[in-house]
Amino acid sequence: MAETAREIADELRERIRSGELRPGARLPGEPALVKQYGVAKETARRALTLLVTEGLAVRRKGSGTYVREFQPIRRVANKRLAHEAWGSARSIWSADIGARPMTVADLRVYETEATGEVARALSLEEGVSVVVRDRLYVVEGEPVQSAVSYLPAALVRGTAITQEDTGAGGVYARLAELGAKPVRFVEELRARMPSPDESDRLRLAEGTPVVEIYRTALTEDGTAVEVNRMLLDAGVYVMEYHITG
């Protein structure tokens, strides 16, 4: 009896997770899957596509589909935003990737007018100036996340926050020095398909979704001092939360 694309993907996924198919190994091609499972070529293609969109495999044009060598990033929101991290001059990224090499690319810092969601989140009138920090995070040579931060220009203009290098501890440490220390963060998450431009920037495989996160940083008195819109390659992230009741 012919199997479905998901059933085939389940079997291949188990072979990957068990170590039978190791990182960098070539997965069975569509003809091999058609022969082994007695399915149509389109079913075999969908099975491989499922593994690609899950981040377990990558397609190499003219060569085939391979087990992805890039190890997933475990994003522990509670840990990465803790004051003991950025407050002790460490990047919040160190909580996600440890010693794995990371670079920031396509960094742009500029002023613009606050509109729509940004103005509402920062409790600003539309048209008021905000400082924007737009960047792309690259881990082990792969773009994994784009991020655009918006901060009230009246608060941060002329500070290190408007420079490419914000210094040890990053933006949050500089905000603390300005008397606007973030003590609470609110994150809203949703999964969606990316636009063509977003796919190009993150170099996403066809059919790969993104996780969109809006994070608002708030001071002790509830003042919003930053809004950060992040787009994560859903195929390379594991989202972890620690919740106590």
Image (tube, rainbow, N blue to C red):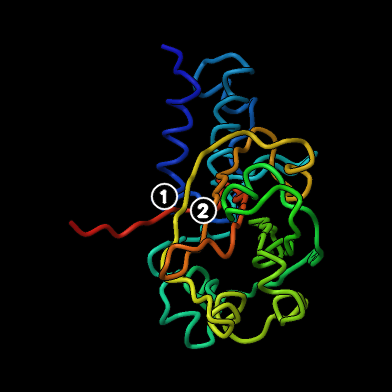
- Relative depth, front residue between 169 and 45: 169
Which x, y percent locates residue 226?
59, 62
Which x, y percent locates residue 38?
52, 15
Question: Residue shown at 54%/49% (left/top)?
Answer: 213
- Relative depth, front residue between 227 and 137: 227
What's the residue type where badge 2 is placed?
Answer: Tyr
> Considering only vertical position in the picture, is 222 above or below 20?
below
The residue wearing badge 1 is: 17
- Relative depth, front residue between 44 and 133: 133
Residue 11 at least partly seen = yes
Question: Residue shown at 74%/64% (left/top)?
Answer: 131
What's the residue type where badge 1 is placed?
Answer: Arg
Q: Secondary structure at mark 1?
A: helix
Give the mark count: 2
Which x, y percent locates residue 189?
49, 45
Q: Secondary structure at mark 2?
A: strand
> Considering only vertical position in the picture, is 22 above or below 168?
above
Kindly give the residue lying farthest to the left in the view shown.
Answer: 245
The residue wearing badge 2 is: 237
Quarter of the image where the C terminus is located:
bottom left
| Label drawn at residue 163 | none
Corner quadrant of residue 79? bottom left
